[in-house]
Amino acid sequence: MTTDHPDQEQHQEQHQEQHQEQHRFHLPSGSAARGAYAVDIDPGRAGWDRSALRVLELEPGGVHTLVTGGSEWIVLPLTGGCMVRTAGGTFQLRGRDSVFSGVSDFAYVPRDAHAEISSGAGGRFALAGAKCERRLPARYGPAPEVPVELRGSGTCSRQVNNFAAAGTFDCDRLIAVEVLTPGGNWSSYPPHKHDEHVPGEECELEEIYYFEVQDGGLGYHRVSPSRDGGTDVLAEVRGGDVVLIPDGWHGPSIAPPGRTLYYLNVMAGPGEERAWLIRDHPDHRWIRDTWPDEPIDARLPLYTAHPSPGPEVTP
């Protein structure tokens, strides 16, 4: 004989809903693969309007054609280097050994274009994209011109490579940066959001986090609801994992002791102004006031932008 327990059933239903929510917004390595891409997140797959991310893996001598459609794209080497050929020019990207070894150069490819990406030695390449309106020229982004920012202090210290931040590289909609968090530190902290338009205070941006963890470790990432029914995720993240953030307070991102945590942020939104305006969670914004009293983690910068050969550009 069995007896129903309504409270227990309700708890099980809530747990199942939370589990489904996790898998909708946290995509473990391999689960977002499609065709030639180890990661393929387009707006339709994410359930939003603009932001996109692909990770292309090329074998030595490999060649891939990117059809940009109505989106602008940045080709960013994660490991290795590549050649990017477009109608607007050909760009030789020196790249890097890994995301933990140095700043990379990159190439911008406009909407309504074709780009051939080839690599003699092979490698992994992030394609950060956004639906856009303006068609800008194809361009090369030199590594030495990438602003490297040290943000926070103490155990909140992190390094931000602002290669395509709103104020550093011209795009129509796309915003993209890299963040490196030393082992044991927290980043994306205090938790913040950008899911509504508040003039001068906050802008609406869809965001993708793509993670790598040094030497095969793991980290954690939190997204908490900013409104009823909003995004609610607590994810154990490993190399190649993706977290989608359509809304909500996101952070912290937690690096395990002894392992540097890397993530690539890709953002875009509907506003006319291309800007990164955020609001901190009111329960945690006080943490910013403590930063002037602590030094930045002595392990930072993990590296700085280094000189690289100029691009091979063929008009």
Image: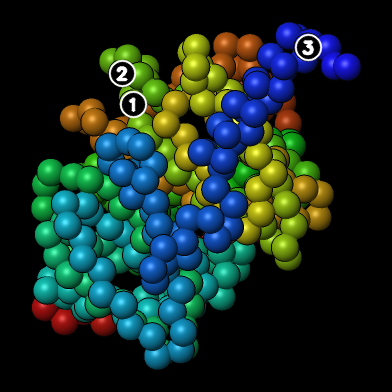
Q: Amino acid at mark 1?
A: Glu
Residue carrying label 3: 4
Q: Are marks 2 and 1 in contact (CB under 8 Å)?
A: yes
Closer to the camera in the image, 281 or 288: 281
Percent position (x, y) of residue 181?
A: 65, 47
In front: label 3 or label 2: 3
20 lies left or right of 7:
left
Disc on the earlier residue, 1 or 3: 3
In front: label 1 or label 3: 3
Percent position (x, y) of residue 204?
A: 33, 26
Residue 271 numbered mark, or none: none
Q: Are marks 3 and 2 in contact (CB under 8 Å)?
A: no
Q: Place residue 126 in its image quadrant.
A: bottom left
Q: Look at 28% across and 15% down and name the residue there.
A: 199
Percent position (x, y) of residue 18?
A: 62, 27
Percent position (x, y) of residue 84?
A: 28, 76
Image quarter in which the N terminus is found: top right
Q: Residue furthest right?
A: 1
Give the colour scheme of this rendering: rainbow
143 lies left or right of 172:
right
Residue carrying label 1: 204
Q: Amino acid at mark 2?
A: His
Residue 197 numbered mark, or none: 2
Tell me the element at label 3: loop
Up the image or down, 303 lies above or below 13; here it is below
Q: Look at 52% across and 73% down and name the residue there.
A: 79
